[in-house]
Image: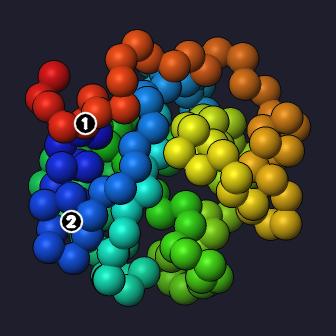
Amino acid sequence: MAKALRALDANERCKVVAVSACYRTPPWGKIDQPDFLNAAAAVDTVLSPRAFLDLCLDTEKALKRERGERWGPRLIDLDILLFGGAVLKEEGLEVPHPRMVERAFVLVPLQEIAPQLTVADKPIGAWIERLDTSGIKREPGDNDWWLTDV
C-alpha cells in the first residue's frame, strides 16, 4: 500500500493529501483467506475520473497485481470511492463506489480522514453504525506509515 500511495503521489498530476492508519480487517466476500490490510487516502488530482482510474490500475499492475478470483487474495487493490461530488456510472467505473456503504472495512478508515463526510445524504458515522465493525483493528503507528518502506 505504501508503494502504491507513493506512486500516486509521485505523479505530477496527483498529490496525496491525507492517509488513514492501516486497519487489519477480516476478509469480506470470500472468507477463507487471511485478514486484509485496508486504508483510505485523499488524493487531489487534475486528472479526470477515468484517467485517475487508469493511473490506479497501472499502479496495481506495476506492483504485480494479478486479477484472479473475485474477492480473493491480492497484493494490492486500489478503489476510487468518491471523486469530489461526481456521480458516474460508466463501463468499469462507478462513483460513488456502489458498495462502499455496505463495507465497514472501507468506511472506518475513510471516516478517519473525512469525519464530516456525507455519503448518499447520510453522515459517514450513521452508515458505520449500521455495520458490523467487530474484527476491525487499527494497526499501531502514525499516519505517515506510507512515506517509508517497511
Looking at marks 2 and 1 on the same chain, the residue that comes earlier in the sequence is marked by 2
Displayed quadrant of residue 146:
top left
Q: Is residue 23 above or below residue 76?
A: above
Q: Is residue 70 visible?
A: yes
Identify the residue under disc 2.
58
Which residue is drawn at the image coordinates 40% and 43% (left, top)? Answer: 19
Which residue is drawn at the image coordinates 18% and 49% (left, top)? Answer: 6
Identify the residue under disc 1.
146
Residue 99 drawn at (x, y percent): 68, 56
Which residue is drawn at the image coordinates 32% and 83% (left, top)? Answer: 46
**Regarding mark 2 in the picture, which secondary structure is present there?**
helix
Report crowding for label 2: few under 14, some 14 to 19, many 20 or more residues within 10 A (C-alpha): few
Displayed quadrant of residue 17:
bottom left
Displayed quadrant of residue 82:
bottom right
Report crowding for label 1: few under 14, some 14 to 19, many 20 or more residues within 10 A (C-alpha): some
Q: Is residue 10 left or right of residue 36?
A: left
- For badge 2, the amino acid type reads Asp
